[in-house]
Image (cartoon, coloured by chain):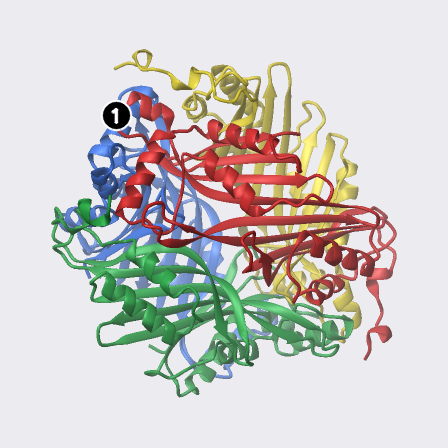
Chain colours: A yellow, B red, C green, D blue
Amino acid sequence: MSNNELPDVQLTKPKHEIAINRVGISDFKMPIFISKKDGGVQHSVANISCYVDLAPNIKGISMSRIPIGLMKFAKEQLSSKMMIKISENIRRSTEADLCDLGYYFTYFLTKHAPVSCEPGILPYEAWFNMIKTKDDHLFRFSVETIASSSCPCSKEISKYSAHNQKSRIKITCQGRKDEFIWIEDIIKIAEEASSCEIYSVLKRPDEKVVTESMYENSKFVEDIARSCYVKLSDIGSIEKFKVEVSNDESIHAHLAKAIIANY
Amino acid sequence: MSNNELPDVQLTKPKHEIAINRVGISDFKMPIFISKKDGGVQHSVANISCYVDLAPNIKGISMSRIPIGLMKFAKEQLSSKMMIKISENIRRSTEADLCDLGYYFTYFLTKHAPVSCEPGILPYEAWFNMIKTKDDHLFRFSVETIASSSCPCSKEISKYSAHNQKSRIKITCQGRKDEFIWIEDIIKIAEEASSCEIYSVLKRPDEKVVTESMYENSKFVEDIARSCYVKLSDIGSIEKFKVEVSNDESIHAHLAKAIIANY
Amino acid sequence: MSNNELPDVQLTKPKHEIAINRVGISDFKMPIFISKKDGGVQHSVANISCYVDLAPNIKGISMSRIPIGLMKFAKEQLSSKMMIKISENIRRSTEADLCDLGYYFTYFLTKHAPVSCEPGILPYEAWFNMIKTKDDHLFRFSVETIASSSCPCSKEISKYSAHNQKSRIKITCQGRKDEFIWIEDIIKIAEEASSCEIYSVLKRPDEKVVTESMYENSKFVEDIARSCYVKLSDIGSIEKFKVEVSNDESIHAHLAKAIIANY
Amino acid sequence: MSNNELPDVQLTKPKHEIAINRVGISDFKMPIFISKKDGGVQHSVANISCYVDLAPNIKGISMSRIPIGLMKFAKEQLSSKMMIKISENIRRSTEADLCDLGYYFTYFLTKHAPVSCEPGILPYEAWFNMIKTKDDHLFRFSVETIASSSCPCSKEISKYSAHNQKSRIKITCQGRKDEFIWIEDIIKIAEEASSCEIYSVLKRPDEKVVTESMYENSKFVEDIARSCYVKLSDIGSIEKFKVEVSNDESIHAHLAKAIIANY
């Protein structure tokens, strides 16, 4: 039996004629690959969500058109430009006014230890989001950088040392129309704002440098957020941004958090 | 050494004089108890976040004042009124303009199976949020109800049966000024909008009723969202609401999702 | 229609006559309460799993008897003795040889800051497990303590400070026949083995003491595991134990982990 | 300052001379790629743990040698043979008797819808584990397949339909010495044991077939576990196996689970 011979309940009238803001799928997993600033591509796995809007007088969307649209571009390199294509394709096939497409994935960078230069790979959680209408589109992305933070108060009041911990610095950016921003540049801002960047491989001479640097650059969660704010404000290609810093306090069960946005 | 003899780094000038939107703590866990509509109290465990704002010219908040404030009210029953007290207390002690206080917890209801009347307890994820300024406050809450959904398309096109699955219906409400809304009333809206409510204990005669009822009331994720919308619109005490429905499709790895809001 | 008038598919012969080790339910959530060492009770929320074994010639268990059994004791205080009653009740009602009952829950202790004596509540993840057969029973429990750890290598090689972080110390115990062990005593072992215990409220004089103490008692993940081992070996009432320590390294994205057991 | 000029605290005597079963790192994230049965390679992201044992008289392992060992093979294709190389390399560099190496990752297969033949990609959670000693090695792996299950009891007692839901079927295998087993073959066993396999893209004619097939092949969680048992027993290259089936019940908040092993 073909598609056309079966009734299409989705196209009937709904009981309540109310427009739906977003309807679609979430947790669709797929391998992806993406350009790196230093050349080459990064392979990863994405958790994808894709929603469209729905007119008041239609009962349901043809939901299979969303994974069909995602599969159609499965071999293409992920980029904001490619996300315009994918979301426009899905918007049209679902006859919607808007398509809201999100990719969550782990990005990777290889960094070299500060003294021994041993290479180590580091993960960064990223999110790409495209909202596409017929005549317009809006792209935003986030990246979460893990770094270390050392407490200025603990340093000041103690005979020696200072409590320190993992700091997760999540920056969300919306570029000016069609301006391109590298994930790597945002990660650099977060790392420079922290007490010290982290590494996957640290031999003893590296660990010495990192421990001392972390202590010298003690920072409150507020300091890290403000440093990111200042640096992000200086980048002309970024229109809106939000900074969320979480310090996983080594002396408490709870976390310390600061949020700052320019909008 | 007393508190006053130690330097207070937090009160110094920050390097960058920028206001911070939110700074505080998250993942602070505490037992709580709360009134139930049918009388008595429900004990649970809360995951609490509490943030204040910070003026541009202060380096950091006195963060210990937040857990001190939470501990001060640890023996009190949780309610929106109590959250006004807690957040106002923390707002004052941190000398902030605003305090944003959130409690995430599991709420429980005991329901009786439809035929055998066997009692069974069911969990509902809830979130209470209070934003308190000097002269005003804003309270919102969410509750996520698990119910079942059965697909109208699958029912229509198949010789027998229909695919069905867990549906998570999250409703977020903001009441009109000082109007009170029971969690139980919001859960009832979600359950009635679903294909069938769920139970913790179902003997065979109950399972027969639930299976048949779920099939008879087949609903798309869009239908459930719209039904909630209509019922929430009818409640005069609710000013703003948002409905998020996720069906954990039994025939796909991904989920189907619909979002609708009245603002 | 009554239960007896409906066919009972569970009691038919299975296609493949193979014994099943464990069959039952998981993620059954329920409020609980439990005795504290210092008197009084602690309310919490449990995530419960309950499995029985199944003979080769029976197609399925009467699964509703498991939540019915859990509900029957819903108002009782949780303890190893109560778990014998619950698991034996479910073992009999399901006509099984064995019942394997587990409760995961957050336990809480109030601790006072070392100098200011400010009270603060702290969460500890716990697991109670009872395996009940007709003539015997076996009880085990775990508790995970969050503490801080400071690195001896980083301290030794650096001009000042040492990297430090949250350390999660999970201890699983199996007592000698019918010997009672308090969760509080196991938590104390973990805290004493760490670089320094943590608190929910720390004013500046407290933070000074904690920072300095953490630095003075620098410990590798291996040191913490071994200290727990020695102390657990000294407790006559404990027959078997396992120690799992995870340090959420402030200088790496990954964790450092050590596992040690006496069996 | 070079590595040799800095003191090596790890090599000193520990306070308590007790052997440590496992010490190393967890949550080390890295991109990987792996051979597929139908040719070509699958890129993914792995969450890696790597532990070694430690002699009683050594304070700590040289932990940086573990990520160095993992990085050394970062460009190699993941396989059980490659894991022998990696774990042996790390075992030697840490001067340990044993290395226990684990990779958790999402594997992907593209399946075609049963009628329309539309391609859709599906995720499978996998775990590869190698335990390497000087003269021996032991390889095990797990793969979790998502499929659908439909309840035979619900079908039998109801006028129409049957409750159905996502079923997660996790199979862990240990092959006979140096026998090779494809992940794809284990996934096929799980899918055939379920009520119906799932797809990422289903047009209406596909959905009809899946709904009907799921109803015709109704299976308890016990039935699925036993079917896997029988099929795994028939594969000569598998020595030990364990089957864990979780049905995310559409009529309950909790899950139904069955576990069966041949050892």
Left or right: B261 in relation to C55:
right
Subunit that carries the residue with mark 1: D
Left or right: D154 in relation to C147:
left
> Viewer-proximal residue, D170 or B25?
B25
Q: In this view, does A106 lie above or below D119?
A: below
Q: In this view, does C230 lie above or below D120?
A: below
Amino acid type of the residue that numbered disc 1 sits on in the rendered structure: Val
Q: Can residue B160 be seen in this view?
A: yes
Q: Is residue C25 above or below residue D45?
A: below
Q: Is residue A75 visible?
A: no
Report the residue marked by disc 1. D209
- Residue C115 is situated, as x and y percent measured from the top left of the image, at 73, 79
Which type of secondary structure does the marked residue at label 1 adopt? helix
> Viewer-proximal residue, A142 or B155?
B155
> Viewer-proximal residue, D30 or B149?
B149
Q: In which quarter of the image is residue A212?
A: bottom right
Q: Quarter of the image for the C terminus of chain D: give it.
A: bottom left
- Residue C119 is situated, as x and y percent measured from the top left of the image, at 68, 73
- Residue D79 is situated, as x and y percent measured from the top left of the image, at 32, 47
Q: Which residue is painted at 20% across and 36% down in the image?
A: D217
Q: In which quarter of the image is residue D239?
A: bottom left
Disc 1 residue crowd, few under 14, some 14–19, many 20+, Cα 10 Å? many
> Viewer-proximal residue, A166 or C152?
A166
